[in-house]
Amino acid sequence: LPESQVAVLRAASANDARSIDRLADETGLKPETVTGAVFELEDEGLVTVEESTDETVTLTDEAREYLADGLPEVRLYEAALDAGADDDPAQMGRVIGQSGLEGPQVDIALSNYARKGYGTIESGEITADPDADPESDAEASALAALDAGDSVAGADVLDQLQSRGLAELSESTVRSVTLTDEGVTAMMEGVETAETVGQLTPEMLTSGEWRDVEFAEYNVEADAERIDGGKTHILRQTANRVKDTLVGMGFEEMEGPHADAEFWINDCLFMPQDHPARTHWDQFALENPREIGKLPDDLVARVEDAHRNGVGEDGDGYHSPWTEEVARGIDLRGHTTSLSMRYLSGHEVGELEPPQRFFSVEKVYRNDTLDPTHLLEFYQIEGWVMAEDLSVRDLMGTFEEFYAQFGITDIEFKPHYNPYTEPSFELFGTHPTTGEMVEIGNSGMFREEVLEPLGVECDVMAWGLALERLLMLMYGFEDIRDVHGTLCDLDLLRETEVLH
Ligand code: PHE
């Protein structure tokens, strides 16, 4: 027998099952070598192997940080109490400042706060439930128990810790080895050690020695270390596929600033400055710089005129306040329709003659409340077609053609209202596992009040579709937070096979 098998046979016993680790200790061999030898010996009938599964829970570095400093949502709750939010709602920015939470911990605190009943977060204000008790926080207690080496009662808490990336569960196969009667006999009769060759060398090949040696056998069942290579995130892969698809349909790509003037984000889109629609994206405003340097004067004048007086013969404006100061304010764009305005205005790539088709697949930012279908930032598939005599049928046909390339053939349309399109339609698709209707986009034909100031004389149909929602329909994800953001599910992302 090969040396390692002989060593293992000597270390094994007939009446005391021994683990691979113990055999490794006693023989001085690596556990994987012992495992290999054990399988060989089992084939020879010299030992028996029993397998069982062992689960171990380990805490991540992030969990260790919280053990020291407290869970982010608990810290937020304490800061909220300090700010008196158990009596009156407090301003959220201030409470976050007081809490000392920074970076991704802020998101983490916000996304767990309401879920765990610490209070509510709404329109920038936070309340603290006076009955909440951080001392009995199940997740905090579970962390402390695991840290002390105790087990955790309740699979739910453990699941939660895992999905927050605080605990990792690993399963390993534990094998215990016992000598069989034949094994005992073999030992008593004495076994011979044979040299086996683990690696074929060029010298063996040239000398011909390879003909005479005995090669170690591969054990293809041995546990191997799992190595996860890096790969492109499925959201990025899908974004690239969307781009290829649109390029294939004859579209060109638009580019432009993530932080932009309200002029391009709202005013060009005929959104009145004093109208709730204006804040309906719940935009994030920039503090520095607060204002855009340059806007095209002639266009600003025409947009202001459309807002004040309307366009066309019987057009009527909003008769509401309009100032260039507001238009110059800089926000993170709540939609990429700001890019469409820049391109349609002729200020990006020059005056455009119909027909034209443009698109972008880019990030937008909204101050939404996080939930399974909403993130503070997401990707929009923006697009528009400029041509003479477009109709709603062209719009619907374009979506059907586009979504069919992703295997989605049951798009439904619902009439909708946008200040900048008439008619407008929301798009819906059916979620493959829940069967629920999911809103996947918004679209319409740009109004005269938008097109005339831009100097566009023909029809323009346009849309903004959510890339993440397309992903949900393609892969059946139910919670968008599994896919990206600080709470994403790495295993899910590793194991999801990309659809082509
Ligand atoms: N801007 C819209 C949104 O974000 C999408 C849209 C774009 C609708 C262009 C109509 C025309 O929901």
Image: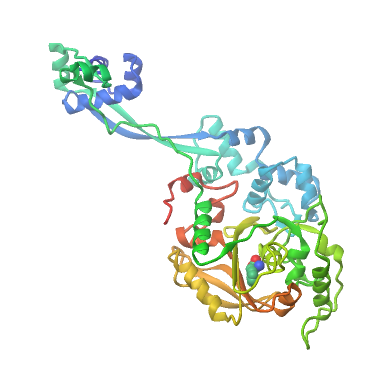
When the figure is inspected, residue 203 is found, relative to residue 461, above or below; the finding is: above
On the question of residue 375 being in view, the answer is no
x, y percent for residue 489: 51, 47
How many numbered discs?
Answer: 0
Q: Nearer the viewer, residue 267 or 312?
A: 312
What residue appears at the point 67 percent right and 46 percent down from the top-left corner?
109
What residue appears at the point 66 percent right and 44 percent down from the top-left corner?
104
Relative placement, left or right, of 163 versus 176 is right
x, y percent for residue 214: 18, 20
Q: Nearer the viewer, residue 238 or 104?
A: 238
Quarter of the image that includes the C terminus = bottom left
x, y percent for residue 426: 59, 73
x, y percent for residue 11: 27, 15
Relative placement, left or right, of 300 versus 45 is right
Relative placement, left or right, of 253 versus 209 is right
Ligand 1, by image quadrant, is bottom right
Relative placement, left or right, of 455 versus 34 is right
Q: Nearer the viewer, residue 19 or 386?
A: 386
Quarter of the image that includes the N terminus = top left
